Image: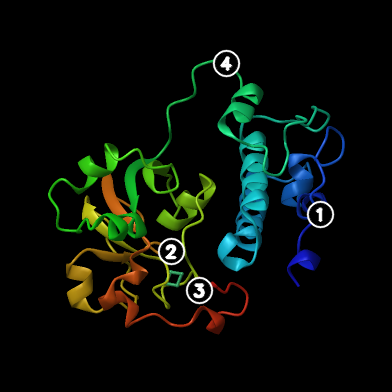
Amino acid sequence: MFLAAVPEGLRTVFDGRVLRAGVASPYEILGVDPEADEAEIVDAYRERVKETHPDQGGSTEAFLAVKTAFERIENGWEPGDAVPEHDVPGGMDAGTVEADEPTEEPPEPEGVKVEYLNYEVMADRLWELTDDDLFEKAADGGLPGEDYGELYVRENESLLEAAERQGYAWPFACRGGACTNCAVAVVEGEMPSPSSHILPKELHDRGIRLSCIVAPETDARIVYNVKHLPAVQDLLLPASRFEASSSTD
Ligand code: FES
């Protein structure tokens, strides 16, 4: 089902083939026409992210290939430019990416800054959401980027979309505020919810938000993956209820 849905350019990723110059352009990987406008490219990117998300039966390699393709287009890749030979499943470690990137100073990130931490890491270390120094401990903890770091949420993006654009595979299922699989805990900052969501007032007052339908109004600190918190777990709808985007986690 999944392979049939993805564009030809991505199948080379799933078949484990190297994407060498001239084989799969960033546009092919996203499945959009090179003449596509920005909105079409963003829409295609979001679709590919959903299809390749590890929670949806995809692979980390495919997910990273989609992210890299989107970043290349955003950074001005044009049809006819070479596709770097290191655009390889499993080969996009930090060293490889650095070799492909221009050496100038990176542009200032656009959007509102969010410092994030993975709840599973906290559980392993017996850290609590109420710890005053939670994020200081995380900063000093030598954690990998998928567990702790910063991301930026642009205008008209949800927190979940921003995380995906920046290459993070956070949990989700319905993407519409109905299942709580995407729940996060806001430790600092303002992140109001729209009027329609399923969280009880008590949880909302404790800072729980649904990352698929919220965005920060100020710089913020959040813990993602809090669907494993007992009070949130009680509200979880099985991901299998959401046909087109089901989480297996
Ligand atoms: S993904 Fe279902 S509430 Fe956000």
The quadrant of the rendering that contains the N terminus is bottom right
Tell me, yes or no, whether the two marked residues, 3 and 2, touch with CB atoms within 8 Å. Answer: yes
Quarter of the render that holds ligand 1 = bottom left
Q: Which mark is residue 103?
A: 4
Give the residue type at disc 4: Thr
Q: Residue at x 63, y 75 (%)?
A: 244
Identify the mark nearer the N-term, 2 or 1: 1
Give the residue type at disc 1: Asp
Q: Viewer-nearest of labels 2 and 4?
A: 4
Q: Is mark 3 within 8 Å of ligand 1?
A: yes
Q: Is mark 2 within 8 Å of ligand 1?
A: yes
Q: With 216 as the anchor, is 28 left or right in this view?
A: right
Q: CA distance from mark 2 to mark 4?
A: 34 Å
Of residues 192 and 5, the one nearer the viewer is: 5
**Residue carrying label 2:** 212
Tell me, yes or no, whether the two marked residues, 1 and 4, touch with CB atoms within 8 Å. Answer: no
Q: Residue at x 35, y 42 (%)?
A: 112
Identify the mark nearer the N-term, 3 or 1: 1
Q: Viewer-nearest of labels 4 and 3?
A: 4
Q: CA distance from mark 2 to mark 1?
A: 31 Å
Identify the mark nearer the N-term, 1 or 4: 1
Q: Viewer-nearest of labels 1 and 4?
A: 1
Q: CA distance from mark 4 to mark 3?
A: 40 Å
- The percent position of residue 134, horizontal first and vertical second, equals 20, 48
- The percent position of residue 230, horizontal first and vertical second, equals 27, 76
Identify the mark nearer the N-term, 2 or 4: 4
Q: Which mark is residue 141?
A: none
**Residue carrying label 1:** 15
Identify the mark nearer the N-term, 3 or 2: 3
**Residue carrying label 3:** 174
